[in-house]
Amino acid sequence: MNVITAADFYRDEFARVASSLPGGRLPWLRRAREAGLASFADTGLPTLRQEDWKYTSVAAIEKSRFAMAVLAPSTANGVTAQQIEGWSLPDTQRLVFVNGRYQPRWSRIGPLPAGVTLASLAEVLERNPEHLESLLGPTPEAYPSGFAALNAAFMSDGAYVHLAAGVALDTPIHLLFVTTEAGLAVQTRNLVVADAGSRASLVEHHVAVGDGAYFTNVITDLVAGRDAEIEHHKLQQESLKAFHVAAVNADQQHGSRFTSRSFALGAVLARIDIRVGLNAEHTACALDGLYMTDGRQHIDHHTRIDHAQPHGTSREFYKGVLAGASRAVFNGKVIVHADAQHSDADQTNRNLLLSDNAEVDTKPQLEIYADDVKCSHGATVGQLDPEQIFYLRSRGVDDASARALLTFAFAEEVIARVGIAPLRARLEKLLLGRLPERVKELL
């Protein structure tokens, strides 16, 4: 019996959907897609034998045969206006994508300052693609994994944000990605380019209609020009049967500021890679994250910060709350290169295990090749403090409520750092939703 390999399957899928993918008239994009497909055929998906994937098996994704979502005319696609409003964040510019396709009928883009472009990437590729070749064309570093290669080949749509020099967009941008069908593979690509002195905040939000099994593979590339400021918040609320693989890549120029906040709550298997290049002097980045797991969930965060030039500052603060028989992975790597004197880096990962069967693998890493730096890192894994529980019990709080209150306080420390008020309120509501009703009355 002939067995169809993953490479054969995706080659057949490419033949099926290639004509419907955006930018088909662009020779450079066709070459990039073909290069991505060829790279995947050579390398396949990561395995446990690779150091960066030794704790996260993606065999379930490789064995599944998720059909690539085909770009169809804009329709409701199984989503109602009530659902969209329920997921939406007030006081934001909103772009909605359903099954990988931009949906103007659900999107709400208000007045924008001169110099701001906020659009569907597919539309930009069709109408004004000239300046995108340097961002989407193939490079030797384009495919750090088979997932990146698949995204390059099948990239369908996503958000394109461009801020001209000196422009400040004070209204946050809400990018809402909805999947409605089981069995789909949705390949999304987002591009954010902030020219010198510009500023913007974004929320990348992934949700699902129903509880089907599907595969989200998303890449978000951000370029921060001289003295630009970008805040990127990622809220992952996928179906608990879904697979979510994501990469966030930030390129920082002189004096720029980049903030990444990742909140991972959904999916049966999620992997988020965040790479930041401090590629000029006096840059700064802050990476915060909160992952909360239950049942058989597996959530993996891998971060990498490259201090490539002098006087760079990085701060990293991740927390995990694990229940049931779930598992989490945190690997944070900070590399201070030889030319990056006077770098200042600090990294912290703290994990709270709520059950005996929960497990976390944490690996903070520092690689320092410069001699005049200030760097530190640390990680903790533990359970709730018995003395704190006893204190609350002595004040009349029952055992279950005491544990829930302490868990809330542990997670809230990360949520409190969110500067976008509607998102912070949404996260607090999601956190409270995991607590007993009697505890909510105490808060």
Image (cartoon, rainbow, N blue to C red):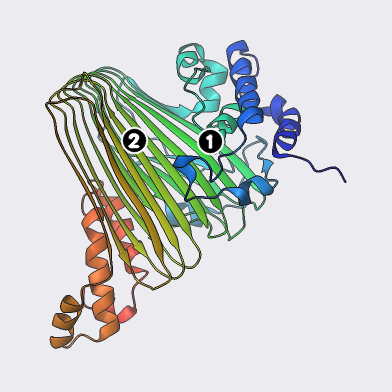
Q: Is residue 155 among the parts visible in the rendering?
A: no
Q: Which label number is shown at residue 13?
A: none
Residue 342 appears at what percent x and percent y?
12, 26
- Report the side of 196 relative to 222 (left or right): left
**Is residue 404 depicted above or below 240 in this figure?**
below
Screen quadrant of the C terminus: bottom left
Q: For the point 51% across and 47% down, which residue is it?
A: 244
Q: Are the residues at dot 2 and dot 1 in contact (C-beta closer than 8 Å)?
A: no
Which residue bears the numbered disc 1?
188
- Report the side of 318 relative to 64 (left or right): left
Q: Quadrant of residue 216?
A: top right
Circle 2: residue type: Arg
Residue furthest to the right: 1
Along the viewing direction, whichever of 19 and 151 lies nearer the viewer = 151
Q: For the point 25% across and 34% down, which residue is it?
A: 170
| Marked residue nearer the N-terminal end (2 or 1) | 1
Distance of label 2 from label 1 (alpha carbons): 22 Å
**Is residue 370 depicted above or below 5 in this figure?**
above
Could you tell me which secondary element the residue under label 1 belongs to? strand
Along the viewing direction, whichever of 167 and 150 lies nearer the viewer = 150
Q: Residues within 10 Å of mark 2 (few under 14, many from 20)?
A: some
Could you tell me which secondary element the residue under label 2 belongs to? strand
Circle 1: residue type: Thr
Which residue bears the numbered disc 2?
304
